[in-house]
Amino acid sequence: MQKVYYNRTKTARRRTRLVSLAVVSVAVAGALARAQQQPLSKPITTSSLDSHQGLTIAADPWLSAERYKQAFAKKSPYNSGILAVMMTIRNDSGESVKVGIERIRLDITFDENNRQQIPPLSSEQLADAVLHPHPKTTSRFPVPIPVPSSGGGGRDKNWQQYQKLAEDAALHAGVVAPHSAVQGLLYFDLQGQFDLLGSARLYIPDLLALEKNQALMYFDIDLSRSGSH
């Protein structure tokens, strides 16, 4: 019978290496998850918020060029007619909540019969709008709906850097863990018509309590009370 000899030292080292890699992977994953969630600390002070079912969502529109300087030092979305809204989603409940960020809308009322819902820009659309702007419209209604980015020419290194800058600052954590908060920007192309915010509301229809698989009531935040910041 042929005997098979094992190198126990080598096998033990391999097992130790695999266990170490697994521990590191878990640690990295945990660090990334914690980086997307902020512990609950000081209360939210903005007047533009809505709160129910253990969830509070606040919206802080940036209505002056000064507020954009720290996040966008060189090319400001504000100078391109784009409104940034700092969103804070605070979860005081005991279960995770999923937020459908892509379904959030800026709801503008022109009169009793005329309303329009504007979707947020993606980071790619924001980079296109700021670095490769189209001619501005003079129409008050409707506000042009952003066209999905085509990925065509003109996306050089400057475009890539700006897109990453916009993405890093954006709200993109779709799940809010229990007793934590997430924060980030949403971008809306108002074509420079920032006074429309006087009749605007932020509509957030898609929220789900994950453990119970239960839809939560929509949020409707009045932005007309934000004032000038």
Image (cartoon, helix red, strand yellow):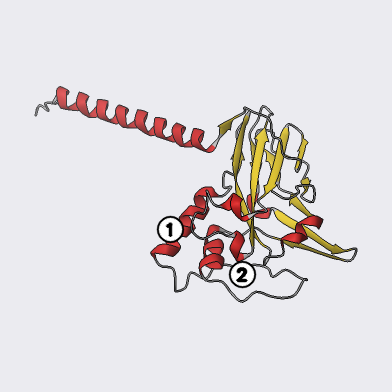
Query: Residue drawn 51% across and 60% down?
Result: 75
Quarter occupied by the N terminus: top left
The residue labelled by disc 1 is 161
The residue closer to the viewer here, 77 or 206, is 77
**Disc 1 crowd, CA 10 A, few/some/many (<14, 14-19, 20+):** few
The residue closer to the viewer here, 62 or 5, is 62
Mark 1: which amino acid? Gln
The quarter of the picture where residue 149 lies is bottom right
Query: Residue drawn 40% across and 34% down?
Result: 28
Indicate which disc residue 219 carries.
none
**Disc 2 crowd, CA 10 A, few/some/many (<14, 14-19, 20+):** few
State the separation of the CA atoms marked 2 and 1. 21 Å
Indicate which disc residue 147 carries.
2
Q: Residue furthest right?
A: 112
Q: Element type at marker 2?
A: loop
Q: Horizontal and vertical percent for residue 73?
A: 49, 54
Q: Is residue 136 left or right of residue 227?
A: left
The quarter of the picture where residue 80 lies is bottom right
Q: Is residue 161 above or below residue 136?
A: above
